Image (cartoon, helix red, strand yellow):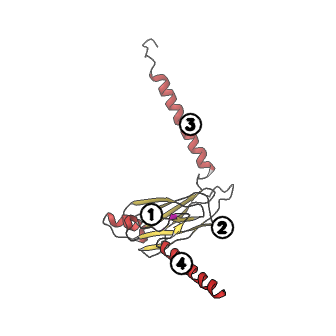
Amino acid sequence: MKRESLRQAAIFGFAAFMFVSALASTTWANGEEFFAPAKNSKIDLVYFGRIKDSQTGRSVTDSVYFVLTDNATGLSFPFVNDKPGHFRSPDVGTAIKEIGEKIDVSAFEVSVIAGGYKRVVLNRMPRKADGAVELDVRLEPVIPGDVSAAGVGGSNVQTIGIILIGAIVAWVIARVVRTSDRPRTAAR
């Protein structure tokens, strides 16, 4: 009896292993294909990784915005993270090759913006220019009252200046619109 149940467990384990292996052609993250190549072809160059808080080491699960810019071609690739704190760029290698250029990772620049964290610009990318390249990002939290921190909204002085300039421009526009439909008089 024990031998029969052991045999059934082995068959079930093997069947489960084969089922999982059949599904593992692409990696799945949160129910979505994570490394599915574009147009069912091979991946040319994709960056992926985790976003972590530099002080706590925990994953950043809030919205994080990335812009990968290729300074050699002028192409920009915006993308965002998912809720567990992972990110994956579009296939930048395919896009660069489609316009007839060569991939130069030394010309890449990644800007990372997240609420409550300082803006990060990554200029040094891994030298690997093909396949899936891991790139982990650590974000430094913004300290309240720190004027030098260039977070999402910039410093308070810059924000107040922009608001004042906007108010002056709105006042001038209102004055011009208010007096534009009045008839001109020669009696003044």
Which residue is the extreme one toward the top?
187
**Left or right for 139, reference 89:** right
What is the distance, in whole Å, between disc 4 and disc 3 at their CAs?
69 Å
Residue 143: x and y, percent?
68, 59
Disc marking residue 58: 2
Residue at the spot of label 4: 15
Task: Kindly indicate the quadrant of the structure image that contains residue 8.
Answer: bottom right
Lower position in the chain sequence, tag 1 or tag 3: 1
Residue 82 placement (x, y as % from top left): 56, 61
Image depth: mark 2 or mark 3 in front: 2
Q: Are marks 4 and 3 in contact (CB under 8 Å)?
A: no
**Quadrant in which residue 42 is drawn:** bottom left
- Mark 4 element type: helix
Q: Nearer the viewer, residue 24 or 152?
A: 24
The residues colored magenta run: 32-36
Give amino acid for label 1.
Pro
The answer to the question of whether label 1 and label 3 lie on touching residues, with beta carbons closer than 8 A, is no
Q: Quadrant of the N terminus?
A: bottom right
Q: Amino acid at mark 2?
A: Arg
Q: CA distance from mark 1 to mark 3?
A: 40 Å
Which percent across, then down, holds residue 130?
Answer: 41, 74
Q: Residue drawn 48% across and 74% down? A: 22
Residue 167, label in figure? 3
- Please rate how many residues cluster around mark 3, counting C-alpha atoms within 10 Å: few if below 14, some from 14 to 19, many from 20: few
Question: In the rendered view, would you say 102 is above or below 160?
Answer: below
> Is residue 20 depicted above or below 69 in this figure?
below
Q: Nearer the viewer, residue 68 or 58?
A: 58
